[in-house]
Amino acid sequence: MLTSAELVWLIAAVAKGDQTAFERLYAATRAKLYGVVLRILRRKDLAEEVIQDVYVKVWSNAGHFNPAIASPITWMVAIARNRAIDLTRKRGEIPLDEESAAMDVAADTPDPLAERERSDELKRLLDCLERLDPERKNMMMLAYYNGWSREQLAQKLERPINTVKTWLRRSLIEVRECLGG
């Protein structure tokens, strides 16, 4: 994988229409983005379809990327994650009876490259999530990592939707305060 600075340079070149830079960016990031999408969709055919959409969006929005706001991989993962979640919601295929794969954050054999990319901000965010009540932490992960809707959360947690909305809002406030902002 390329360094963050190299990815920033590639995205800037892509913003200028450089197809070679786009090919390098694709080659350097496809595996990671595909893994994110596959984890959400759990279907290879849909993941391939979403990955194509993701890279079309990266190509068309490269000029809007701001390295002061996010790292290149964070920006691209956000695009991939949002596309996968949109498709999942559209298709209504999130199984409510399964435990979230998002709760298995630590793998048995962690990828050393992924560890290197984990920023201090991400570590702080994970620390703040750990401070939440376990039920609320689970709800946050299902909502914001796996893309579950409030309706799906309400059904899974057997709570009224307004309670779920309130818990999500309060949990977000707690996390924001923990992060210092």
Image (cartoon, grey):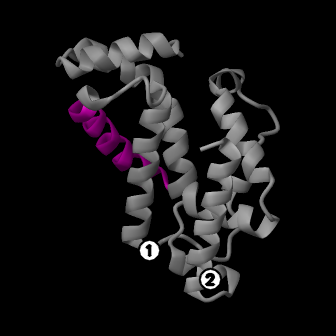
The x and y percentages for residue 172 are 61, 59
Q: Quadrant of the N terminus?
A: top right
Q: Is residue 118 above or below residue 101?
A: above
The x and y percentages for residue 71 are 48, 26
Residue drawn at (80%, 54%) of the image: 131
Q: Secondary structure at mark 2?
A: helix
The single residue placed furthest to the left in the displayed view is 17
The stretch in magenta equals: 43-61
- Residue 153 in view: no
Give the amino acid type for the residue marked by disc 2 in the picture.
Thr
Give the amino acid type for the residue marked by disc 1 in the picture.
Gly
**Quadrant position of residue 113:** top right
| Left or right of 154, for residue 27 | left
| Left or right of 22, for residue 81 | right
Q: Circles 2 and 1: CB distance less than 8 Å?
A: no
* Nearer to us in this view, 50 or 14: 14
Mark 2 / mark 1, whichever is N-terminal: 1
Separation (CA) of disc 2 from disc 1:
22 Å
Q: Is residue 111 above or below residue 90?
A: above
Q: Residues within 10 Å of mark 1 (few under 14, many from 20)?
A: few
| Left or right of 119, for residue 68 | left
Q: Is residue 163 above or below residue 136?
A: below
The x and y percentages for residue 166 are 60, 76
| Magenta residues, dominant SS class | helix
Q: Secondary structure at mark 1?
A: loop
Q: In this figure, which residue is indicated by the disc labeled 2?
A: 163
Residue drawn at (47%, 38%) of the image: 77
In the rendered structure, does residue 32 fall within the stretch colored magenta?
Answer: no
- Residue 61 in view: yes
Q: In this figure, which residue is indicated by the disc labeled 1?
A: 92
